[in-house]
Amino acid sequence: MGTEQPTPTGPGVPLTPSGLFPGAPPRRAYREPHPVRSWAVLAGIGAAGAWLVLFTLLGTDLPSHIWWLLTGGGLAWAGALGLARFGDRGVAVGVAVATAFAWATGAGIVTLYWIVTADWPLW
């Protein structure tokens, strides 16, 4: 008589549904503390695109255009690493995407020039 044990509560103890709402108990929701927003990605793409165009325009011929593109892209990626660690990760993603696209385009142009002229343009 009267020897009922108290029900344990606290972390690690499974929730017992009351029966008012049938089904499994609700699951916990884990959310990203700093979510990546689409407008931030687009801002990063725009800023990096302008940065890379300005760097590329410093060249006078194909080899110098490509070397300036590689230099500007390396600096942009260094900035993206800093943004990913200390700033807005959405902008960092946009910068990385724009730089990768620009480098791939530059590699395609160098390859096309190499195929057409049989001369490697970067040395």
Image: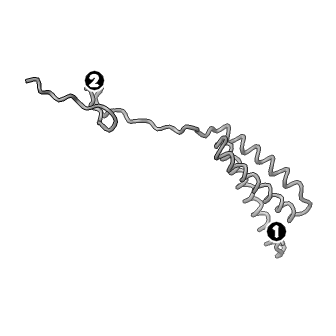
Residue matched to label 2: 20
Badge 1 density bin: few <14, some 14–19, many ≥20, Cα 10 Å: some
Q: Position of residue 47 (x, y in %)?
A: 77, 44
Q: Position of residue 117 (x, y in %)?
A: 84, 73
Residue matched to label 1: 113
Q: Position of residue 2 (x, y in %)?
A: 11, 23
Residue 41 lies left or right of residue 107; in this view the side is left
Identify the secondary structure beneath mark 1. helix
Query: For the point 40% across and 35% down, which residue is it?
Result: 28
Residue 112 lies left or right of residue 11; in this view the side is right
Residue 13 lies left or right of residue 92; in this view the side is left
Query: For the point 84% across and 59% down, which residue is it?
Result: 68
Q: Position of residue 107 (x, y in %)?
A: 75, 63
Query: For the point 64% across and 46% down, which residue is it?
Result: 85
Q: Reading the chain from its start, which is encountered first: label 2 or label 1?
A: 2
Query: For the point 31% across and 34% down, which residue is it?
Result: 24
